[in-house]
Amino acid sequence: MDPILLFYATFFPLLSLAFLIFYKKSNYASNPNLPPGRMGLPYIGESIEYLLTGRRGHPEKFLKDRMAKYSSQVFKTSIFGEPMAVVCGAVGNKFLFSNENKLVTSWWPDSVNKIFPSSTQTSSKEESIKMRKMLPNFLKPEALQRYIGMMDMIAQRHFEASWEGKQEITVFPLAKRYTFWVACKVFLSIEDPVHVSKFADPFNALAAGIIAVPIDLPGTPFRRAINAAETIRKELMAIIKQRKMDLAENKATPNQDILSHMLLATDEKGQYLNELNIADRILGLLIGGHDTASATVTFIVKYLAELPNIYNEVYKEQMEIARSKKEGEMLNWEDIQKMKYSWNVACEVMRLAPPLQGAFREAITDFTFAGFSIPKGWKLHWNVNSTHKNPECFPEPEKFEPARFEGSGPAPYTFVPFGGGPRMCPGKEYARLEILVFMHNVIKRFNWEKLIPDEMIIVDPLPMPAKGLPVRLLPH
Ligand code: HEM
């Protein structure tokens, strides 16, 4: 054997083994009561298994295997280069959601932090906290009611432009176009489709780089995402400056969109919010709200194609609302309240195909959970599938059953597509409105059938049908 080859063949496995033993020892020696589990290879940990099971269409497999092997309450792993405790079940969800800023705080992988440098870097920390506290005010149901007609108007224009007159369409890219158009209108009063699609380009680069390998070199998806975020931030700052002038000259109105609302809002000391913070928050909302809601409406179309009985019930509910409207009258808050069955269907879709798999926290102090030690600095992960697909929380979990959401609905902390506690998704109500407006508009116009009967679902990082869900449209 070539001596150099021999050197590499023996040296590398030995070095890796030594590193692995040292790594494991140092972890266990300092704290023997860590949760059961496997830390995987140094640095890489179990990231590959975590990401690959999703690509193979089984995002819950990583979790299920380890819950069965180690513990149904908590297990340890290492993902994104960090030691991590994965807390499971309703008890785990409740524990993390109720200990925000007491035992844990929000944490995102490095790639996310680098693309979205927190507001602490662009403005003061206090400003950022102030904005986070005020965000729910801009997105609460009372504030959003006035935007339902706007969402309906955009939905109608979207269906006229992209669905009507076509025999076959691919749902996912169109769903993205719809949610982005709605966001541009409701947040920024941008409604011209040409402007909207120009603005959408950097968002596509951004989405492609968020969970990419964080290598910041020219030409990498990660670098492209950083540049895209910078481009969008600049454009948002220009929009904000122009809006301030328009408001001062009464060319814009205080209630016309969320941007005006934010610019005119004051804190308890009567101070206005910082412009950079507003730009960052709008960027966060555009990102947070865009792909999640489009994944949901795509899966609604998928399940309605597969389940004609459910389709018929949604159709009945929506047509009753449609028939009660005068010619040209837009949807309003009362109509949304009548869409109870449709929302149960949307919830069942989010239970089975949750847009986000969960989120992360960091331990801000040493503590114990389920009898195991979680050291300060460790990361924690809660994952929707530990309850959504658990027969103890949802009997026959694979069955599509909207009735689960009737009455008082699922047990607390079991249905968590939006998270829970103080960090629960602030866009939940906004998402509910745009999803229901979409359901109303699509079912009023069409029936449909899938063109690929067994299209695979991938999770990258959001779930989506591998080919984007092509369907044949069948007008009523
Ligand atoms: C079906 C649609 C959606 C789902 C399933 C969803 C789910 C989630 C989840 C699971 C989190 C993380 C919570 C945690 O850290 O524990 C989150 C955070 C967030 N979401 Fe949503 N979301 C959706 C739509 C939206 C929309 C439409 C917006 C904006 C209008 C939005 C804005 C945000 C923001 C800004 C955060 C970060 C909050 C923070 O860090 O405090 N989301 N969302």
Image (cartoon, helix red, strand yellow):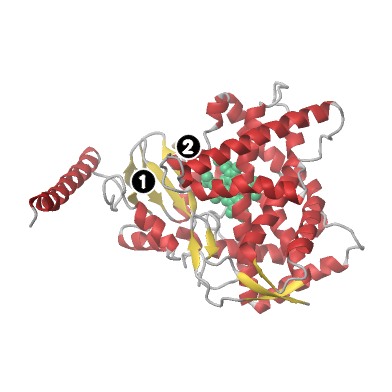
Q: Position of residue 25 (x, y in %)?
A: 19, 43
Quadrant of image for the N terminus: bottom left
Q: Is residue 241 above or below residue 87?
A: above
Q: Is residue 122 above or below residue 187?
A: above
Are the residues at dot 1 and dot 2 in contact (C-beta closer than 8 Å)? no
Nearest to the eye among marks 1 and 2: give it.
2
The residue positioned farthest toward the front in the image shown: 2
The amino acid at mark 1 is Met
Mark number, residue 84: 1
Where is residue 236, by image quadrant?
top right
Drawn side of residue 462 relative to residue 237, left or right = left
Quadrant of image for the C terminus: bottom right
Q: Residue at x 60, y 46 (%)?
A: 203
The residue under label 2 is 114
User: Which residue is more in the foreground, 173 or 323?
Assistant: 173
Instruction: Tell which circle, 1 or 2, labels the residue nearer the N-terminal end.
Output: 1
Drawn side of residue 349 relative to residue 69, left or right = right
Where is residue 175, by image quadrant?
bottom right
Q: Position of residue 254 (x, y in %)?
A: 82, 34
Drawn side of residue 362 relative to residue 46, left or right = right
Q: Is residue 242 above or below residue 94?
A: above
Q: Say which element carries label 1.
A: strand
Q: Residues within 10 Å of mark 1 (few under 14, many from 20)?
A: many
User: Which residue is more in the foreground, 466 or 413?
Assistant: 466
Q: Say which element carries label 2.
A: helix
Q: Residue at x 71, y 48 (%)?
A: 196
